[in-house]
């Protein structure tokens, strides 16, 4: 059950494309225009912003993430007091923002954080630390297109927009283009090398000795040459990689990737077999809120799997479950009613959401329904009360898990069941699934 082929064999015609590249492109265009998903078509972001516009963005962040009516703690266990919060506000140059501010475009040059506020300090629930830093949005891959609204007062942080989130990125990790089209054209080049492994390394030299940067599943880079071999005779891809010059400006260099790496020229075909293989490449990898510590949280796992096929996904599980096709309202349904819906849910193409969590549906085996997901912990109720067991990794679970705990089973808590595929394929994949 911890091998993708176990689940692939349960599907009739698992190599059938569920969406064509043209259908995926059309869906992406539609979703990038939706206001409710918090996605952004960065290349079409307006060039000039008023002071009122920018202040509204800052205030939205502050209202959503700056609430400190309850105690919050830093990574060293100290209370984040009023002096800290006032200092945080003071780092943002609200009073110096002007009408007609022009957005700068650039590219990310190394895997980096995007933060809620311009600080490396953590915001934790308790003084003993924890894994859930509420100031951490996500990690951003090298080569990602970024629009910079303005800088912190000390210039060390850039208030930025990427495709799936807005926040603060270290300025040293962004190379700014002199002209907007310089950055956009890099992202729009069609002949691209897509990262299909969980993580890979890109090198500065053809001998593959000096690492330039690491990058994760779903990232892609323009291919310059696919016929080169290094001094050892090993075939390599030559890609274009962004570089930040000393003055912060964007330039480009050659990057080198072994053709034996887990990469693919162009996006993978979107099939159930490929979904399974992509998801299981992350099995047992660590949980990481916002990818802190090199792991993935539940929604990033889903995002990276679908990125492999060129399907644009929001970063948050709530918004991810607003995509695809609903297989019927499940919130408030009985266990029996939910099972009937799952019986017609296409495996390896359906996501299941419960509040604060999202999972990929694998299928049914011996009367039980299984998922793969990045799970932080489970809670069970025993004679001495509820106990929480830390899992903190990507696992395969059956949906009856947690049935004895105060929060009830995973299946009981599922609120959304969404299929990702075309109308023309859904009936075929449902009837072709084996129990």
Image: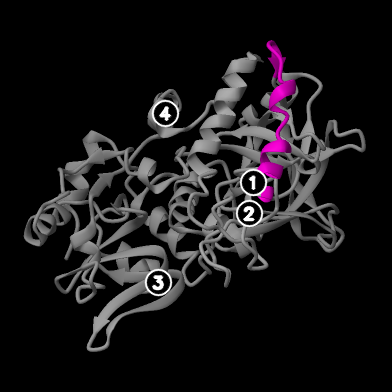
Label 2 belongs to which residue? 81
Gap between marks 4 and 1 measured at Cα = 48 Å
Specify which label sits upstream in the sequence, 4 or 2: 4
Instruction: Check contact, mark 4 vs mark 2: CB within 8 A.
Output: no
Q: Is residue 197 visible?
A: no
Q: Can you tell which mark lies on residue 85?
A: 1
Crowd class of label 2 (few under 14; some 14 to 19; many from 20; radius 10 Å): few
Label 3 belongs to which residue? 377
User: Between tags 3 and 1, which lies in front?
Assistant: 1
Locate residue 219, reporting x and y percent.
Answer: 60, 45
Locate residue 331, reporting x and y percent.
Answer: 17, 49
Asked if the magenta segment contains residue 347, the reply would be no
Gap between marks 4 and 2 measured at Cα = 52 Å
Specify which label sits upstream in the sequence, 4 or 1: 4
Judge left or right: residue 232 versus residue 70.
Answer: right
Front in this rendered view, residue 272 or 330: 330
Locate residue 431, reporting x and y percent.
Answer: 14, 51
Specify which label sits upstream in the sequence, 3 or 1: 1
Give the extent of the magenta segment.
Answer: 83-102
User: Between tags 4 and 1, which lies in front?
Assistant: 1
User: Please, is residue 143 above or below residue 135 in the view?
Assistant: above
Q: Picture quarter containing residue 23?
A: top left
Judge left or right: residue 334 versus residue 259.
Answer: left
């Amino acid at each position: 059950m911890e091998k993708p082929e176990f689940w692939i064999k349960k599907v009739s015609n698992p190599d059938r494309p569920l969406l064509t590249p043209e259908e995926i492109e059309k869906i992406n265009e539609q979703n990038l225009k939706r206001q409710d998903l918090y996605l952004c078509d960065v290349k079409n972001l307006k060039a000039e912003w008023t002071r009122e516009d920018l202040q509204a963005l800052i205030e939205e962040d502050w209202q959503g993430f700056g609430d400190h009516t309850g105690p919050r703690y830093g990574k060293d266990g100290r209370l984040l007091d009023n002096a800290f919060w006032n200092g945080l506000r003071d780092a943002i140059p609200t009073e110096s923002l002007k009408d007609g501010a022009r957005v700068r475009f650039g590219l990310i040059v190394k895997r980096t954080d995007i933060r809620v506020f311009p600080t490396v300090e953590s915001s934790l629930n308790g003084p003993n630390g924890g894994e859930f830093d509420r100031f951490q949005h996500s990690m951003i891959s090298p080569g990602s297109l970024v629009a910079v609204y303005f800088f912190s007062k000390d210039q060390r942080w850039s208030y930025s927009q990427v495709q799936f989130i807005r926040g603060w990125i270290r300025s040293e990790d962004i190379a700014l283009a002199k002209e907007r089209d310089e950055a956009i054209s890099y992202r729009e080049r069609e002949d691209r090398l897509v990262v299909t492994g969980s993580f890979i390394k890109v090198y500065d030299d053809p001998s593959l000795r000096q690492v330039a940067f690491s990058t994760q599943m779903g990232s892609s880079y323009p291919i310059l040459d696919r016929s080169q071999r290094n001094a050892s005779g090993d075939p390599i891809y030559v890609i274009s990689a962004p570089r930040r010059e000393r003055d912060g400006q964007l330039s480009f260099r050659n990057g080198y990737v072994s053709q034996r790496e887990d990469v693919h020229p162009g996006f993978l075909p979107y099939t159930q077999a490929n979904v399974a293989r992509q998801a299981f490449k992350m099995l047992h990898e660590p949980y990481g809120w916002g990818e802190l510590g090199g792991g993935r949280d539940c929604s990033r796992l889903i995002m990276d799997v679908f990125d492999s096929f060129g399907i644009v996904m929001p970063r948050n599980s709530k918004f991810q479950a607003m995509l695809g096709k609903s297989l019927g309202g499940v919130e408030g349904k009985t266990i029996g009613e939910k099972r009937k819906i799952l019986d017609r849910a296409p495996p390896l193409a359906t996501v299941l959401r419960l509040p604060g969590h999202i999972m990929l549906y694998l299928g049914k085996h011996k009367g039980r329904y299984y998922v793969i997901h990045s799970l932080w912990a489970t809670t069970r109720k025993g004679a001495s009360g509820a106990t929480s067991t830390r899992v903190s990794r990507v696992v395969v679970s059956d949906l009856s898990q947690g049935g004895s705990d105060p929060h009830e089973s995973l299946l009981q808590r599922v609120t959304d069941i969404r299929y990702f595929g075309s109308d023309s394929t859904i009936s075929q994949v449902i009837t072709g699934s084996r129990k």
